[in-house]
Image (cartoon, rainbow, N blue to C red):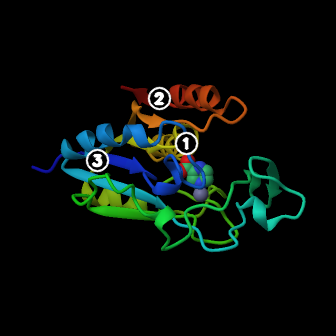
Protein backbone atom coordinates (compact mmCIF):
# COMPACT_ATOMS: atom_id res chain seq x y z
CA UNK A 1 0.00 0.00 0.00
CA UNK A 2 1.14 3.46 -0.85
CA UNK A 3 2.11 5.65 2.08
CA UNK A 4 -0.23 8.53 2.92
CA UNK A 5 2.69 10.81 3.71
CA UNK A 6 4.60 13.01 1.27
CA UNK A 7 7.80 14.96 1.73
CA UNK A 8 7.52 18.51 0.39
CA UNK A 9 10.93 20.00 -0.42
CA UNK A 10 10.60 23.74 -0.78
CA UNK A 11 12.73 25.83 -3.16
CA UNK A 12 16.13 24.10 -2.77
CA UNK A 13 17.50 26.27 -5.58
CA UNK A 14 20.86 27.88 -6.23
CA UNK A 15 19.59 31.42 -5.75
CA UNK A 16 18.55 30.63 -2.16
CA UNK A 17 21.88 28.99 -1.31
CA UNK A 18 25.20 30.70 -0.54
CA UNK A 19 26.41 32.66 -3.57
CA UNK A 20 22.87 32.97 -4.97
CA UNK A 21 20.90 36.14 -5.69
CA UNK A 22 18.73 35.76 -2.57
CA UNK A 23 21.02 33.62 -0.47
CA UNK A 24 19.60 32.35 2.79
CA UNK A 25 22.28 31.93 5.45
CA UNK A 26 22.71 28.20 6.05
CA UNK A 27 20.90 27.25 2.85
CA UNK A 28 23.70 25.15 1.42
CA UNK A 29 24.45 23.38 4.67
CA UNK A 30 21.02 21.73 4.86
CA UNK A 31 21.41 19.94 1.51
CA UNK A 32 22.82 16.68 2.99
CA UNK A 33 19.99 16.50 5.52
CA UNK A 34 17.38 17.20 2.86
CA UNK A 35 18.92 14.41 0.76
CA UNK A 36 18.60 12.05 3.71
CA UNK A 37 14.94 12.96 4.06
CA UNK A 38 14.31 12.48 0.33
CA UNK A 39 15.78 8.98 0.55
CA UNK A 40 13.31 8.08 3.30
CA UNK A 41 9.99 8.88 1.56
CA UNK A 42 7.97 7.14 -1.14
CA UNK A 43 6.35 10.39 -2.24
CA UNK A 44 8.61 13.36 -2.78
CA UNK A 45 7.31 16.64 -4.15
CA UNK A 46 9.55 19.62 -4.92
CA UNK A 47 8.67 23.26 -5.36
CA UNK A 48 10.64 25.54 -7.65
CA UNK A 49 10.39 29.33 -7.46
CA UNK A 50 10.08 30.25 -11.15
CA UNK A 51 9.84 33.93 -12.01
CA UNK A 52 9.60 35.64 -15.40
CA UNK A 53 11.82 38.66 -16.04
CA UNK A 54 10.36 41.83 -14.58
CA UNK A 55 8.41 39.97 -11.90
CA UNK A 56 6.39 42.30 -9.67
CA UNK A 57 8.15 41.00 -6.53
CA UNK A 58 11.49 42.32 -7.76
CA UNK A 59 12.62 45.63 -6.20
CA UNK A 60 14.34 46.40 -9.53
CA UNK A 61 10.88 47.06 -11.03
CA UNK A 62 10.33 50.15 -8.88
CA UNK A 63 12.36 53.31 -9.14
CA UNK A 64 12.13 54.23 -5.47
CA UNK A 65 12.39 50.79 -3.86
CA UNK A 66 15.26 48.70 -2.54
CA UNK A 67 15.29 44.95 -1.86
CA UNK A 68 13.61 43.93 1.42
CA UNK A 69 11.36 47.00 1.47
CA UNK A 70 7.65 46.38 1.14
CA UNK A 71 5.00 47.56 -1.30
CA UNK A 72 1.22 47.48 -1.30
CA UNK A 73 -0.08 45.15 -4.02
CA UNK A 74 -3.78 44.70 -4.95
CA UNK A 75 -3.65 41.52 -2.83
CA UNK A 76 -1.91 43.09 0.19
CA UNK A 77 1.59 43.79 1.44
CA UNK A 78 4.44 42.30 -0.55
CA UNK A 79 8.13 42.20 0.35
CA UNK A 80 10.37 43.22 -2.55
CA UNK A 81 13.28 40.93 -3.35
CA UNK A 82 16.44 41.06 -5.40
CA UNK A 83 15.86 39.53 -8.87
CA UNK A 84 16.00 35.77 -8.30
CA UNK A 85 15.00 32.38 -9.70
CA UNK A 86 14.53 33.59 -13.26
CA UNK A 87 12.94 30.86 -15.36
CA UNK A 88 15.52 28.61 -16.99
CA UNK A 89 18.57 30.17 -15.35
CA UNK A 90 21.18 28.46 -13.20
CA UNK A 91 19.90 30.44 -10.22
CA UNK A 92 16.52 28.76 -10.59
CA UNK A 93 18.02 25.27 -10.91
CA UNK A 94 17.99 22.90 -7.94
CA UNK A 95 21.20 22.90 -5.93
CA UNK A 96 23.65 20.66 -7.73
CA UNK A 97 24.09 18.37 -4.74
CA UNK A 98 20.36 17.98 -4.18
CA UNK A 99 19.39 14.38 -4.90
CA UNK A 100 15.99 15.17 -6.36
CA UNK A 101 15.58 12.58 -9.11
CA UNK A 102 13.10 10.41 -7.20
CA UNK A 103 10.66 13.32 -6.89
CA UNK A 104 7.28 12.58 -8.47
CA UNK A 105 6.09 16.16 -8.91
CA UNK A 106 7.67 19.58 -9.26
CA UNK A 107 5.34 22.48 -8.52
CA UNK A 108 6.54 25.69 -10.14
CA UNK A 109 5.30 28.90 -8.59
CA UNK A 110 5.64 32.65 -8.99
CA UNK A 111 5.36 32.42 -12.78
CA UNK A 112 2.66 35.09 -13.07
CA UNK A 113 4.28 38.48 -13.37
CA UNK A 114 1.69 40.28 -11.25
CA UNK A 115 1.42 37.85 -8.30
CA UNK A 116 4.10 36.38 -6.10
CA UNK A 117 3.68 32.88 -4.72
CA UNK A 118 5.31 31.74 -1.48
CA UNK A 119 2.99 28.82 -0.74
CA UNK A 120 3.08 25.56 -2.65
CA UNK A 121 -0.73 25.61 -2.54
CA UNK A 122 -1.85 29.15 -3.37
CA UNK A 123 -0.37 32.29 -4.82
CA UNK A 124 0.00 35.35 -2.60
CA UNK A 125 -3.49 36.62 -3.49
CA UNK A 126 -4.55 33.60 -1.37
CA UNK A 127 -7.00 32.66 -4.12
CA UNK A 128 -5.18 31.30 -7.14
CA UNK A 129 -4.49 27.61 -6.56
CA UNK A 130 -1.37 25.82 -7.77
CA UNK A 131 -3.19 22.49 -8.02
CA UNK A 132 -1.22 20.81 -5.23
CA UNK A 133 -4.19 20.23 -2.89
CA UNK A 134 -6.11 18.42 -5.64
CA UNK A 135 -3.07 16.36 -6.56
CA UNK A 136 -2.53 15.24 -2.97
CA UNK A 137 -6.19 14.35 -2.49
CA UNK A 138 -6.28 12.31 -5.69
CA UNK A 139 -3.16 10.49 -4.58
CA UNK A 140 -4.68 9.75 -1.16
CA UNK A 141 -1.98 11.71 0.67
CA UNK A 142 -3.14 13.48 3.84
CA UNK A 143 0.08 14.02 5.74
CA UNK A 144 2.99 16.30 4.80
CA UNK A 145 6.54 16.66 6.02
CA UNK A 146 8.19 19.90 4.97
CA UNK A 147 11.79 21.05 4.61
CA UNK A 148 13.76 23.52 2.50
CA UNK A 149 13.95 27.28 2.04
CA UNK A 150 13.07 29.65 3.39
CA UNK A 151 11.66 28.65 6.79
CA UNK A 152 9.87 31.96 7.35
CA UNK A 153 8.53 32.48 3.81
CA UNK A 154 7.88 29.61 1.43
CA UNK A 155 8.11 26.80 4.00
CA UNK A 156 5.89 28.63 6.50
CA UNK A 157 3.28 29.72 3.96
CA UNK A 158 3.16 26.19 2.56
CA UNK A 159 2.78 24.62 6.01
CA UNK A 160 0.04 27.09 6.98
CA UNK A 161 -1.83 26.39 3.76
CA UNK A 162 -1.40 22.64 4.26
CA UNK A 163 -3.25 22.99 7.57
CA UNK A 164 -5.85 25.24 6.00
CA UNK A 165 -6.59 22.64 3.31
CA UNK A 166 -6.91 19.90 5.92
CA UNK A 167 -3.54 18.16 5.71
CA UNK A 168 -1.41 17.38 8.71
CA UNK A 169 1.95 19.12 8.52
CA UNK A 170 5.29 18.72 10.22
CA UNK A 171 8.31 20.94 9.58
CA UNK A 172 11.75 19.41 9.99
CA UNK A 173 13.27 22.61 11.32
CA UNK A 174 16.90 21.52 11.13
CA UNK A 175 16.39 20.90 7.39
CA UNK A 176 15.36 24.53 6.85
CA UNK A 177 17.03 27.95 7.03
CA UNK A 178 15.39 31.34 7.55
CA UNK A 179 15.69 34.77 5.92
CA UNK A 180 14.58 36.38 9.23
CA UNK A 181 13.43 39.79 8.06
CA UNK A 182 12.16 42.00 10.92
CA UNK A 183 11.56 39.04 13.21
CA UNK A 184 9.78 37.00 10.55
CA UNK A 185 11.29 33.75 11.83
CA UNK A 186 9.75 33.95 15.31
CA UNK A 187 6.52 35.39 13.98
CA UNK A 188 5.99 32.64 11.42
CA UNK A 189 7.01 29.92 13.85
CA UNK A 190 4.30 31.09 16.23
CA UNK A 191 1.73 31.30 13.43
CA UNK A 192 2.58 27.72 12.45
CA UNK A 193 2.30 26.49 16.04
CA UNK A 194 -1.09 28.15 16.36
CA UNK A 195 -2.25 26.50 13.14
CA UNK A 196 -1.31 23.05 14.43
CA UNK A 197 1.88 22.59 12.43
CA UNK A 198 4.21 20.24 14.30
CA UNK A 199 7.98 20.54 14.49
CA UNK A 200 10.48 17.71 14.38
C1 LIG B 1 11.16 32.78 -1.29
C2 LIG B 1 11.30 35.05 -1.20
C3 LIG B 1 11.00 35.16 -2.53
C4 LIG B 1 11.26 31.48 -0.56
C5 LIG B 1 10.84 32.87 -2.63
O1 LIG B 1 11.51 30.44 -1.21
O2 LIG B 1 11.12 31.48 0.67
N1 LIG B 1 11.37 33.89 -0.58
N2 LIG B 1 10.77 34.05 -3.25
ZN1 LIG C 1 10.54 34.29 -5.37
The spot of residue 66 in percent (x, y) is 81, 53
The spot of residue 55 in percent (x, y) is 68, 68
Mark 2, Cα crowd under 10 Å, few <14 / some 14-19 / many 20+, is: some
In this view, which residue lies farthest toward the right? 64
Compared to residue 99, the image places residue 88 above or below, namely below
Mark 2 and mark 3: Cα distance apart in space = 18 Å
Compared to residue 135, the image places residue 119 above or below, namely above
| The quarter of the picture showing ligand 2 | bottom right
- Nearest the camera: 191 or 54? 54
Mark 1, Cα crowd under 10 Å, few <14 / some 14-19 / many 20+, is: many
Residue at left offset 66%, top offset 72%: 113
Mark 1 and mark 2: Cα distance apart in space = 26 Å
- Determine which residue is flagged by label 2: 196
| Earlier-in-chain disc, 1 versus 2 | 1
Residue at left offset 57%, top offset 70%: 111
- Determine which residue is flagged by label 3: 6
Compared to residue 157, the image places residue 73 above or below, namely below
Task: Locate residue 40: give its quadrant.
Answer: top left
Left/right placement of residue 71 relative to residue 31 reads right
| In front: label 1 or label 2 | 1
Name the secondary structure under disc 3: strand
Is any atom of residue 53 visible in this view?
yes
- Determine which residue is flagged by label 1: 24
| In front: label 1 or label 3 | 1
The spot of residue 170 in percent (x, y) is 38, 33
Left/right placement of residue 162 relative to residue 103 reads right
Q: Is mark 1 within 8 Å of ligand 1?
A: yes
In this view, which residue lies farthest toward the front? 19
Amino acid sequence: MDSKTALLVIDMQNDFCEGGALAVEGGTSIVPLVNKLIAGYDHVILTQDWHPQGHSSFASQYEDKAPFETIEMPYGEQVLWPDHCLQGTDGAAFHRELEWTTAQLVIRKGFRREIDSYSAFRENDRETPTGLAGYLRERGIDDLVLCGLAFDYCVAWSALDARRFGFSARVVEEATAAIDLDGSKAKMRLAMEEAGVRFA
